[in-house]
Image (tube, rainbow, N blue to C red):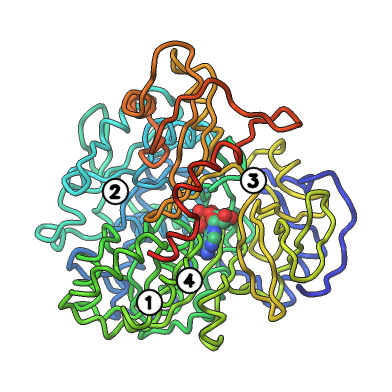
């Protein structure tokens, strides 16, 4: 958006790769981002320090009725970092973190940030296939999972998963479990927060080492990778997004400022906090950077969320469109007092106009549309925007340093207001994926723009409207399903000769997946194929919602499967804007 100089051409995604796996920003932009004040010499581990020093007794986290104040969280993160260092986890080591929204999630994140260890953020719904992939891609030395107390909540045995993952990933030296009591009220209050984890060791639980005073970990370089986020993806292979301390610190600080967060703000983390939206846009970390209070909800269902909003006087939260629909339905008859809620962010998938219009009358708060991606770029409608803009656009870029191009299929910039693929770069958008030079060659332009795969148009006021996408990803209510990944697994089924996974419009989720299968023999049905994928360790949201058997897959002139032709009859049966009208 700003008139920045065009950098010299280099091969696509061909920036210099740092030994820690991220592609560096070119020197001229580093200088510019520092001079503009976007980047500061700060680390994510620093983020709590000021508030902890000034007002240690202020509540930082509320989870399951238990309050952790700033002083306590700050000190516990240091102690936990020390104990993890004694265990042998070092700066630069990767550790997969798979935890629901709970105190321990935030605590272990800060411990890793301070040690310079790099959390790899898995979602609670990920299963063996996804976790194996994360371990392989990162060479993770550790894996953090919920202990039994949490299992009771989710009904899933993460301990068994961890044992299986460890068998297939010998480099995985440590499995950290939240303690049985942690995350549930009762006994949790009695144990210090840094006692929140135990080690899983040959089927037994062992305490973390605590002998002697652990050396204070050296403060990481603000330019180093702080965390790895999972990409929603534009192609088949899973990809990780390396976010550095200073770029992510800017991401969350600028988001918090835009949303007007301060030390009176109370943010309800209803979406998984491991997802960029709820983590740093401004989310959990942005709220803590502003000195506010984070309320952690184990799920986003309206029952629990409304009770928390009333009890904790929540002022701000974030949702995807399908969850908003549930909240709106519940709000019609709930007795809960939602009057503290001032702002509701909605993003992750396209929000229909009708649902957008119901937010203020239904929930009594302002709506903010958010169009974002874990790769970086965030667009927000602003509090001061006219209603029409908030209802009909997905916002405008967060930063004056964000550069956007909208291009046609040949890569040429379209005329203002026309629809094209969005390309972007800026002070918090990555220049390449983690250790993936081949993907980078197509996912980024020669001059470092990320090809979002989203089709957008830009209004005269600079707001974006998302019109569709060119990437082969199904957006299932905000959860992204990379079609090629699921197709590869389905092709392994003995009865499947060919397959194409296609998104079809759906009133609840915006989109659901349909697998068009050319059978080799027999009639493989939905239940059988879903069970097959589940057994291969795929997360539930990737299982096809529907299976259609066909004699052949239609092809485009170029010989590729014509997914549009496949989806058309199903789309006609379920008009695309029905979600908007529901
Ligand atoms: C968020 O992040 P991801 O990485 O799970 O997915 C990014 C993709 C975007 O490229 C776009 O295709 C889609 O999700 N998307 C939207 C949207 N917000 C995201 N499509 C239409 N309308 C929207 N408002 O989804 C994400 C990250 C940070 C904040 C919010 C969402």
481 left or right of 420? left
For mark 1, give the secondary structure.
helix
Q: Which residue is mark 4?
A: 353
For mark 4, give the secondary structure.
helix
Please name the residue shown 44% across and 14% down the image: 495
Mark 3 burial class by Cα count in 10 Å: few <14, some 14-19, many 20+: many
Q: Nearer the viewer, mark 3 or mark 2?
A: 3
Nearer to the camera, 90 or 339:
339
Residue 281 in the image: state x and y as whole percent: 49, 68
Q: Which mark is residue 472?
A: none
The earlier-in-sequence mark between 2 and 1 is 2
Q: CA distance from mark 1 to mark 3?
A: 38 Å
- Contact, mark 2 vs mark 1 (Cβ under 8 Å): no
| Quadrant in which the N terminus appears | bottom right
Residue 343 in the image: state x and y as whole percent: 40, 80
For mark 2, give the secondary structure.
loop
Mark 1 burial class by Cα count in 10 Å: few <14, some 14-19, many 20+: some
């Amino acid at each position: 958006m700003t008139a920045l100089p065009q950098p010299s051409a280099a091969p696509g995604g061909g920036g210099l790769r740092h030994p820690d796996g991220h592609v560096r920003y070119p020197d001229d932009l580093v200088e510019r981002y520092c001079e503009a004040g976007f980047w500061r010499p700060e680390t994510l581990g620093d983020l709590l320090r000021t508030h902890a020093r000034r007002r240690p007794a202020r509540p930082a986290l509320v989870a399951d009725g238990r309050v952790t104040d700033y002083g306590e969280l700050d000190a516990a993160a240091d102690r936990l970092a020390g104990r993890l260092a004694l265990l042998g986890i070092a700066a630069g080591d990767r550790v997969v973190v798979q935890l629901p929204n709970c105190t321990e999630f935030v605590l272990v994140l800060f411990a890793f940030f301070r040690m310079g260890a790099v959390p790899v953020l898995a979602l609670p719904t990920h299963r063996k296939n996804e976790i194996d992939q994360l371990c392989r891609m990162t060479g993770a030395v550790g894996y953090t999972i919920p202990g039994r107390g949490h299992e009771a909540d989710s009904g899933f045995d993460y301990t068994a998963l961890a044992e299986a993952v460890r068998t297939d990933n010998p480099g995985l030296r440590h499995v950290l479990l939240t303690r049985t009591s942690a995350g549930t009220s009762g006994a949790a209050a009695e144990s210090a927060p840094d006692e929140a984890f135990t080690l899983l060791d040959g089927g037994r639980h062992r305490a973390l080492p605590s002998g002697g005073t652990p050396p204070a970990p050296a403060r990481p370089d603000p330019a180093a990778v702080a965390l790895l986020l999972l990409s929603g993806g534009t192609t088949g292979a899973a990809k990780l997004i390396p976010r550095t301390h200073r770029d992510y610190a800017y991401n969350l600080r600028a988001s918090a400022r835009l949303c007007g967060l301060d030390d009176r703000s109370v943010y309800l983390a209803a979406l998984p906090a491991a997802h960029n939206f709820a983590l740093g846009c401004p989310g959990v970390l942005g709220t803590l950077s502003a000195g506010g209070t984070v309320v952690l909800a184990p799920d986003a269902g309206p029952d629990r969320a409304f009770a928390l909003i009333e009890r904790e006087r929540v002022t701000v939260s974030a949702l995807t469109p399908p969850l908003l629909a549930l909240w709106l339905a519940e709000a019609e008859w709930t007795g809960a007092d939602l009057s503290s809620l001032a702002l509701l962010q909605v993003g992750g998938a396209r929000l229909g106009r009708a649902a957008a219009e119901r937010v203020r009358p239904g929930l009594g708060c302002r709506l903010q549309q958010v169009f974002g991606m874990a790769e970086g770029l965030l667009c927000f409608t602003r509090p001061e925007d006219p209603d029409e803009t908030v209802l009909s656009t997905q916002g405008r870029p967060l930063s004056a340093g964000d550069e956007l191009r909208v291009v046609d299929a040949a890569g040429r910039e379209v005329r203002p207001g026309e629809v094209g693929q969005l390309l972007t770069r800026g002070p918090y958008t990555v220049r390449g994926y983690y250790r993936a030079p081949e993907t980078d060659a197509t996912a980024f332009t020669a001059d470092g723009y990320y090809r979002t795969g989203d089709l957008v148009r830009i209004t005269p006021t600079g707001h974006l409207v998302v019109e569709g996408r060119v990437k082969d990803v199904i957006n299932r209510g905000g959860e992204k399903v990379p079609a090629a990944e699921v197709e590869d697994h389905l092709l392994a089924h003995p009865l499947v000769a060919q397959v194409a996974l296609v998104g079809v419009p759906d009133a609840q989720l915006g989109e659901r997946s349909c697998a068009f299968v050319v059978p080799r023999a027999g009639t493989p049905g939905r239940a059988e194929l879903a069970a097959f994928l589940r057994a291969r360790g795929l997360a539930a949201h990737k299982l096809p919602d529907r299976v259609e058997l066909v004699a052949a897959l239609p092809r485009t002139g170029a010989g590729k499967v014509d997914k549009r032709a496949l989806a058309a009859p199903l789309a006609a049966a379920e008009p695309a804007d029905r979600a908007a009208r529901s």
